[in-house]
Amino acid sequence: MICYSDLLAVAELLGKLGPRIGVGAIHAILLLGAAAAWFPFLWMVLASLKSNTEIFRYPPTLWPQELQLENLTTLFEEKPFASWNFNSIWIAIVGTLLTLFFSSLAGFGFGKYKFKGRTVLFAVLIGSLIIPFQLILTPLFVVIGKLGWIDNYLALFVPFVAPAFGIFLMKQFMARIPDELLDAARIDGGSEFLIYRIIIVPMVRPGLAALAIFTFLNFWNSFLWPLVVLRSDDHYTLPVGMATFYAVLIRVEYGAIMLGSTLISLPIIVLFLLMQRHFISGLTLGSVRE
Amino acid sequence: MAGMRAASDASLGPAFPETPRWWTRNQKRLAPYVFISPFYILFFAFFLGPSIFAFYLAFQEWTGLGAPEFVGLRNFLDLVEDRTFRQAVVNSAFYSAASLFVITPLSLLLAVALNSRFVRAKIVFRTVFFLPILTSTIAIALVFVLLYGTRYGLLNAPLVALDIQPIDWLGSKVWSKIAVTGLILWRWVGFNMIYFLAGLQAIPQHLYEAAKVDGANHWQSLRFITLPMLRPVILFVTVIVLIGSAQIFDEPYILTEGEPAESSTSLAMYLYRVGLHFLSFGYASAIGTVFFIAIFAFSWMQLRVLGVFRDD
């Protein structure tokens, strides 16, 4: 039987040995985690240059034995990979820009004004986070059908460009802006929208950067909804398009899937590396009380 | 830029461009409503409207053509009898429990390790841990199919080498859920870690220094400072993880398609199938309603604990 006092004794012993064992253990944990995170990714990148037979060869090879450049041809000539890229990129960019605009505007509205009904309206906003997308999947599909938006790109971003999460996040950033600054601009005759444009936007830039990458990632990886809405294969976004490789059971070009996915991952990884400081500070702002 | 130009042009009049008088007088009062209106317009049209429509459809039978037919509680009674539905509920509950009790603690462990002052190259580690969520599920699912391979998969390699019966990860009813959980774990641990990491970095250093002066060791600091101070973040991540995992779709859809024998079908997958393949809009809405009640219960409890509704 292990009882609580034994555990305490063990903890105390570990505490004494702490620094020495601790540092070793910490590094072991981190390296193990990093290897686990890195390995499937590395495997994907390397497999993008392999042929089907080599991917399934036993014993498996890590480095490609002979470079299979046909994967590139499969991707760009047999499938409209270029269109998928184009669709994904512009939808993610337009969707993100609109989201940034509407979120920061509403965040400004909630963060810097006192108005009638504010508490109730804010409760509705937070309450909306509780609606699971699954509840509305079918009826939203019906609404989109009524609007004539089946197979139309509008359906992929219009409903999502004023997300409660984004507004909540931007509102948190507003707290740092002194009210005196806004009042000074008002005395100078600045309109409320102008105040938003020339004072608020520059001051919440870190928040916008965070929301930008978060939103971009959401649009970019979005799979279920585009799968429901899109019909013709040159309208597909990248994730839906890549999934069609799975549907062809006769001849699945695994190397081409890997190559396509490697190419998909690159822009988002570069974006993340460029903006990760902002992203990480913004991502967590809602959770850490100041 | 435009604002600066306007300011320098206006040497005679007000510093900013003129706006209509009525608006000038009332804008401070009305502007917030205009600013927040896009959310409510989209929310009513695309979220609240469809939600109410879903609650209505849950009591109807409808395939999208003609008029819906009122069937009372039949959809819900059918759900109770529906073996696939019950299996999907069990599976989704499994994914949620695994996310809560395995993925969240692992994220916390990695964050605590990464936050240690003995660790160098933190940015490299952080980026590597974040890599999975940036990659496409489609391709990674395939990598996992190969890793899980019964005879030649890397995960079975030690068993094969020791001549032990290898695990049929994707073909067995017991292991398929665990295989899907493995993919979910790989994708989300690093992402959740970032929340914890930021929470850890927000803990004031002087608390640790004070504890050290009082003779506390590392474990005591962790137990009596780090964990209590991290409580709000832990609760926040718990909510995110529960809501997210209850809605899991991509991972099982791509990795196993619910096979074998629905043993890994998630609730979201089943709803998608019923609503958009079988076009049973009423029945799908009944599933959606059950979904909503579950998520509502989870979130309400936890948002209350978190105090998110307190507006300030």
Image (cartoon, rainbow, N blue to C red):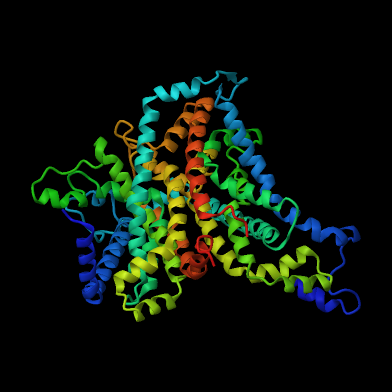
Question: How many marks on residues?
Answer: 0
Residue at (45%, 55%) from the top-left corner?
Answer: B235
What residue is at 78 percent from the left and 64 percent from the top? Answer: A192
Establish if A288 lies above or below B147: below
Above or below: residue B122 compared with residue B173: below
Relative to residue A251, is residue A270 depicted above or below?
below
In this view of the protein, can residue A70 be seen by the observer?
A: no
Residue B95 is situated, as x and y percent measured from the top left of the image, at 36, 43
**In the rendered image, which quarter contains the C terminus of chain B?**
bottom right
> Looking at the image, can residue B199 be seen?
yes
Residue B113 drawn at (x, y percent)? 32, 68
Q: Residue furthest front?
A: A5
Q: For the N terminus of chain B, give its image quadrant.
A: bottom right
Outermost residue toward the bottom?
A: B213
- From the viewer's side, name the closer residue of B91 and B300: B300
Position of residue B85 measured from the top left corner of the image (x, y, whole percent): 40, 29
| Image coords of residue A29 (percent x, y) | 27, 65
Q: Nearer the viewer, residue B172 or B149?
A: B172
Residue B308 or residue B71, whichever sits in front: B308
Q: Is residue A166 left or right of residue A222?
A: right
Kindly give the residue lying farthest to the left in the view shown.
Answer: B163
Q: In the figure, residue A27 lies in which quadrant?
A: bottom left
Q: Quadrant of residue A141?
A: top right
Left or right: A110 in relation to B283:
right
